[in-house]
Image (tube, rainbow, N blue to C red):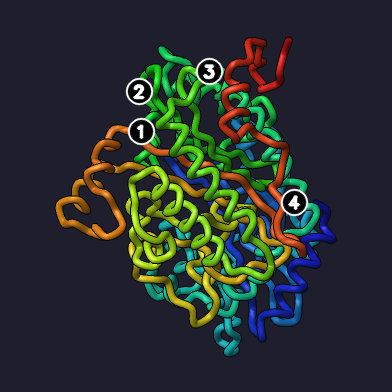
Amino acid sequence: MNALTYQQRRRVLRQSVGGGAILLPGNTDASRNYAANVYPFRQDSSFLYYAGIDHPGLVLLILPDGEEILYGPPAQPDDVIWSGPRPGRGDFAVDAGIDRHEARDELAGELAGLAGRGVAIHYLPPYRASGRLQLAASLGAGPDAAADGFSAELVGAVVVQREIKTDEEIAEIELAIAVSAMMYRIALHNARPGLREAQIAGAMQGVALAHDMQPSFLPIVTVRGEVLHNETYRNKLREGQLLLVDSGVETALRYCSDITRTLPVGGVFSPRQREIYEVVLSAQQAAIETAGPAATNRDVHLAAARAVAAGLIAVGLMKGDAEEAVAAGAHALFFPHGIGHMLGLDVHDMENLGDAVGYAPGEARSDQFGLNYLRLAKGLRPGFVITLEPGVYFIPALIDRWSADGRHADFIDHAAVRKYRDFGGIRIEDDVLVTEEGCRVLGPPIPKTVEDVELAMAWTGNVQHDGSQGE
C-alpha cells in the first residue's frame, strides 16, 4: 500500500485520540536459543497498519502537533557481510510518508521532554516480554508500571479503525484464502491411510512458501480433532479416521487467512461420521444466514449452537428442546468454544488489545461454560471480516466428567454419548465479510459438503507442489 494510505490512517488516529502523543513501537527480533539465531520476524500488526514497515527495531512517535518521527537503530558497517545491502531508517521513513527520522537512542529523551511538559503519552498494551522491557526503558518506568499504563483511549481508537476492512485489505485477505485453497487441495489429495500427519502438514506449508507466503499460525493437522489446538504431527493416518486441518497463511503485507476442513481418511465418510459432519455443516450455515449488520456475533454463535443441539437431538445424543438446551449450556459438551473471531493483520485480529475488540463498552463475557470463550460478541458492522467455525467434538475427559456428575441429564443422553468417546472432532471454518445485506464467504470455494469433499478426494489426477492441479 502506498504512503498516502498510511498517512491517512495516522491522521485519522490522531484525530480520534483527544490529545497527547501517540507511541507505536514495532517488534524486535526474538532469539530462539542464542542472540544470532532468531525466529522469523513478525512485525507488530498495529505498527504495520499505521506505518507499513516490516523491519525490526523501529518505533513511530506522533507528536501532539502532528509531527511524526520514526526511530530506528543505526546501521552497523559489518551488517552488509551477513545480511547484504539493507534499507536504512531514512528509506523506511520515505516509504511510510514520515518526514523525520532519528536514532533509536534519542527516543527516551524525547518522551521525557513530553512528560515533563505534562503531555500524555498514549501507547498500546505490550504483549511480548521484550516489548514490555523496551517500553519501560523508553518511558523511564518499571516494567509493570509501563505495561499497566497503556491508553484505553488509544486501544478504542485503533479498534474502531482496524475492525473495518477497506477494499484493499479485503483483496489481500482473499489472496491469502486463494493460497489456502491450494493448500487444501494438497490435503484432500493426500489424506490417505499410511501417510503421516507431518507429511501433509509439510506439503501444505510448502504450498505457502511456493507462493511467497508463510503460515499465519502453526497449522493443526491431526487425527485427534477433539484436541482443539493439537499442534503435533506424530500420528500415521488409518482408514476410517477423521483428519482435522486448521491452517492459514499471511500475504507479503501480513493479511491472514484461517480455514478449517475435516476430511475422512480414505476418502469416504462412514455413516456415523456423515451424521455428525452434517450437524456441523448445518451449524455453519445457520451462522452464515444469521451474520449481518442486524445481528450481534453472540446472535450468530447462539444460532450455530441451536443448530448443533437440534442436530444432535436428531442423532440421539441430546434430547429435549434445542433452544432450552442451549440456554442451559448443555450443547457446550460438544461445542465448547466460540463461533469465531476477527480476521485481518492478525489471524485473531487485534486479540492483543483485549476484550475491547470483541465486546461493546460495558459488555462483559458470559460466565457460562462454552459461551465464556466467545471472543467476539458485539454487533456486526459492514466491513468486519470474521471467521465462522462451529465444531462438534467428543472429548473423553469432558464426557467422563459430565457423565459422572449427571450434568445436564435432561438434555444429554450420557450413555449414548459414551459410545462416541473415540470419535474425535469435526470443525468447519470459513472467512466471512459482513456486508450491508448480510455476509459473504470470502475467497474461492474450498470443498465443504460431504459430496464435494468425497468427490475431491476421489480425484486421481496430479497436484503440483505449489497446489496447482495437473492432469
Tag 3–tag 1 contact (CB < 8 Å): no
Q: Looking at the image, which residue is at 39% across and 66% down? A: 324
Label 1: how many Cα within 10 Å (few below 14, some 14–19, many 20+) = many
Q: Secondary structure at mark 3?
A: helix
Query: 393 above or below 52?
Result: above
Q: Is residue 200 visible?
A: yes
Distance between mark 4 and mark 3 Cα atoms: 30 Å
* Residue behind mark 3: 190
* Residue behind mark 1: 224
Q: Amino acid at mark 4?
A: Ile
| In-front residue for pair 294/79 | 294
Nearer the observer: mark 1 or 4; the answer is: 1
Q: Amino acid at mark 1?
A: Arg
User: Which callout, 4 or 3, points at the residue further toward the start of the chain?
Assistant: 4
Q: Position of residue 237 (x, y in %)?
A: 39, 19
Label 4: how many Cα within 10 Å (few below 14, some 14–19, many 20+) = many
* Residue behind mark 2: 235
Q: Secondary structure at mark 1?
A: loop
Tag 1–tag 2 contact (CB < 8 Å): yes
| In-front residue for pair 195/173 | 195
* Residue behind mark 4: 170
Q: Amino acid at mark 3?
A: Asn
Distance between mark 3 and mark 1 Cα atoms: 17 Å
User: Which callout, 1 or 2, points at the residue further toward the start of the chain?
Assistant: 1
Query: 56 above or below 150?
Result: above
| In-front residue for pair 164/372 | 372
User: Which callout, 3 or 1, points at the residue further toward the start of the chain?
Assistant: 3
Q: Looking at the image, which residue is at 54% across and 47% down? A: 282
Q: Position of residue 52 (x, y in %)?
A: 71, 54
